[in-house]
Amino acid sequence: MLNLYRVLYRKYRPKYFADVIGQPQVTDTLKNELKADRLAHAYLFTGSRGTGKTTCSKILSKAVNCLSPKDGDPCGECAICRGIDDGSITDVVEIDAASNNGVDDIRILREEANFTPAEAKYRVYIIDEVHMLSISAFNALLKTLEEPPPHVIFILATTEVHKLPATITSRCQRFDFHRISPEDIAKRLEYVCGEENVSVDHDAALLIAGIADGAMRDALSLLDQCMGQTEHITEEAVRKTAGLADKSHLFEITDSILNKDPARAVQTVDELHRNSKDMARLCEELIGHFRAIMLIKTVKDPKNNIVMSESDFERVSKQAEMMKLPFVIQVIDTLQSAMERMFQGVNRRIEMEMTVVKLCSCESSDNSNPNVNSNLEQRISVLEKFFEVIKNNPSVLQQKTASKTVNAIAPPIKKPSVDMDELRKNAVKFQQWQEIIENIKNYSKSLGTSFDGSTAYISGKYVLVDSNNDLCFELLRKPEHRTELKNIIQKVTGKSYSLGRYSYPDEQKADDPLTKLLSDFKAAGVPVEDKKNNTNNGG
């Protein structure tokens, strides 16, 4: 007779509480209750997949019925323990609530529960994925949970405890199963490989643990696949088996984003696509890569939160030094949005290519603009000094003289200047402006109407708008309106332009929050030196 191969997660399923990995908050408590003979009539095991809920349910069902328990654990040798293991004991019943979720199924269970056990001490009902029961089934189960026969124990297991009615959870003793740490999973995998006479690199075991995301069953299943290919499991073998992108490609794409090289980024994505790499998985890995960069930049000791080899950690750390945190967060947000769209039916390859091009573009990847950041830092410094003076000397608000007070506290900020006379001198009339206005009206009627009668000019990289209607400029102060207008201009002309005002450039100072704030201070009686500065009309 041909013997079927037993998969690893079944072959190495723990038989004692001490063998359960990474759940001491559950196993220690259960052992103490068993030793003190303080059994509950209903238990609720919650947690993500593959963390040991079903395993602990089976160990508990054996422990409460074992003829010779040892320190809270089942002996594993008596007739009851062996019968539960091979399924010959009918007093321990496993029910899959996903396929037996009707009220009739629970009614049958209630009728059976009234009968005394045939062989064991307790009748144990293990209801897996209990959140799948219907409302009527929960109501049918409620009475039995509230007043169960003395010989019945219920063990409810679920990955989505929030879907259970409060009336059910309140009648159970709840145990939360945590995701197992990568190091604990890696140690278990190395133990299993030793038992199977297979060698595994520690980096490969850590990679499997990272892919499993805290689920021991998933880790053992992937290890099973790797063992089917080679007797020496390396990181490369794991990546090949799991269909992961090689780490070098992740570094290449990241370098392309840093260097603003969309051609190289798209080429890397195409190479991976030709090698049958799943684009959604690639996107997920890139998110994980930039998550590591984010943690390196924010966490004091990031190694505890990142699963990777020492050499990869050093490479990621070097890339992290070249990025600012807001840019990293922007990249993660963009990649997550792309992955969501991939699961909505769009072409995954095109979506991935669009995403890397977007991340490589100047607007998306300007993560180290010294003018923007230094200007912001200078503004913050100005306000801090200003309010410190007011705090220490409130009478300054009533002073009408000493015109140099504010200027000494907050010297004028030198903003990048634009020579408006030169721009107007080289400006040519924007022939497609009326078409632009019609497109604006499709986006916003009020914004488009405010541009009626206006004229626009092109000068270098600027579109300069000339209008007597100040409402259009008021509306353009909203970032979303400015962005939409720039996108419309790019769509019509095929070129990207900044926005400016053709005439009355001094009015653009109203766009400057600091200028407005200082004006308000001046109106309140705070002495402000009125210095004219060149204004940046670019938007």
Image (cartoon, rainbow, N blue to C red):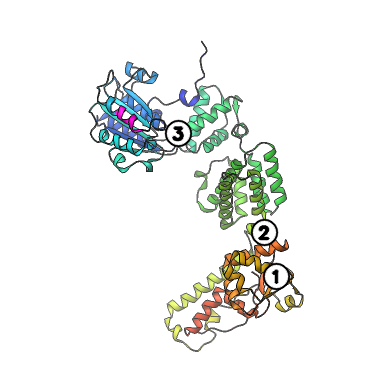
The residue positioned 70% from the left and 47% from the top of the image is 266
Residue type at numbered disc 3: Gly
Secondary structure of residue under mark 3: loop
Which residue is label 2 attached to? 362
Which residue is label 3 attached to? 50
Which residue is label 1 attached to? 433
The residue positioned 63% from the left and 66% from the top of the image is 440
Residue 196 higher or lower than 310, as above or below? above
**Main secondary structure along the magenta-highlighted residues:** helix
Q: Quadrant of residue 433?
A: bottom right
Q: Is there any visible trace of residue 110 in the rendered image?
A: yes
Secondary structure of residue under mark 1: helix
**Considering only order in the chain, which callout, 3 or 1, is on the residue closer to the N terminus?**
3
- On screen, residue 472 versus residue 172, left or right, reads right
Q: Residues within 10 Å of mark 1 (few under 14, many from 20)?
A: some
- On screen, residue 53 versus residue 303, left or right, reads left
Name the spot of residue 377 as percent of width and height, x first.
Answer: 56, 68
Q: Residues within 10 Å of mark 2 (few under 14, many from 20)?
A: few
Name the spot of residue 254 as percent of width and height, x first.
Answer: 64, 49
The residue positioned 33% from the left and 16% from the top of the image is 79
Residue type at numbered disc 1: Trp
Q: Quadrant of residue 112?
A: top left
Closer to us: 280 or 133: 133
**Cβ atoms under marks 1 and 3 closer than 8 Å:** no
Report the span colored magenta: 102-109
**Cβ atoms under marks 2 and 1 closer than 8 Å:** no
- Disc 2 to disc 3, C-alpha distance: 44 Å
Q: Is there any visible trace of residue 476 in the rendered image?
A: no
Q: Residues within 10 Å of mark 3 (few under 14, many from 20)?
A: many
